[in-house]
Image (cartoon, rainbow, N blue to C red):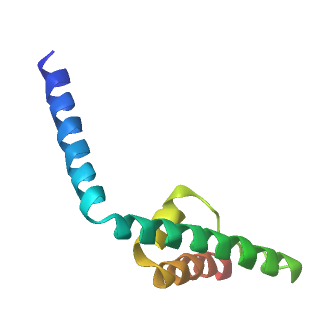
Amino acid sequence: MESQIFVAIIIICVALILFGVIKHRFDLLVNFGLRIFSGLLGIYLLNNLFLSFHLSLTAGTNAFNALVIGLLGIPGFLLVYGITAFYYFT
């Protein structure tokens, strides 16, 4: 019972912190979302380009890649394809 109360308190605290951040810095949230959208669109387009040249050098469009691209931007996009190229050529 006590562990459930502790978990509930943690969830409420995290929710209040997120609400405060979103209320004061909404532009950061919009920027993060736009980076994710443009990054995943770039992965999709580059995957199609590579497949048209019969290369299987494709990155996945998953939550981890979206998070990396959302946090890092263009360097994150290059990191995702750099790791993909590393595993493709080794």
Look at 21% across and 45% down and name the residue there.
16
Q: Residue at x 20, y 22 (%)?
A: 4
Which percent across, then down, holds residue 84? 61, 75
- Position in image of residue 38 (x %, y %): 59, 74
Please give the name of the residue rendered at 55% of the width and 77% of the height, measured from the top-left corner. Answer: 83
Side of 90 relative to 47 (left or right):
left
Q: Quadrant of residue 6?
A: top left
Q: Quadrant of residue 32?
A: bottom left
Question: Quick one: 54 or 19, which is closer to the camera?
Answer: 19
In the image, residue 4 above or below residue 56: above
Residue 54 location, quadrant: bottom right
Q: Residue at x 24, y 62 (%)?
A: 24
Give the vertical position of 77 relative to 67 (above or below). Answer: below
Q: Is residue 50 above or below residue 6?
A: below
59 vs 28, left or right, is right
Image position of 4 (left or right of 63): left
Query: Residue pushed farthest top?
Result: 1
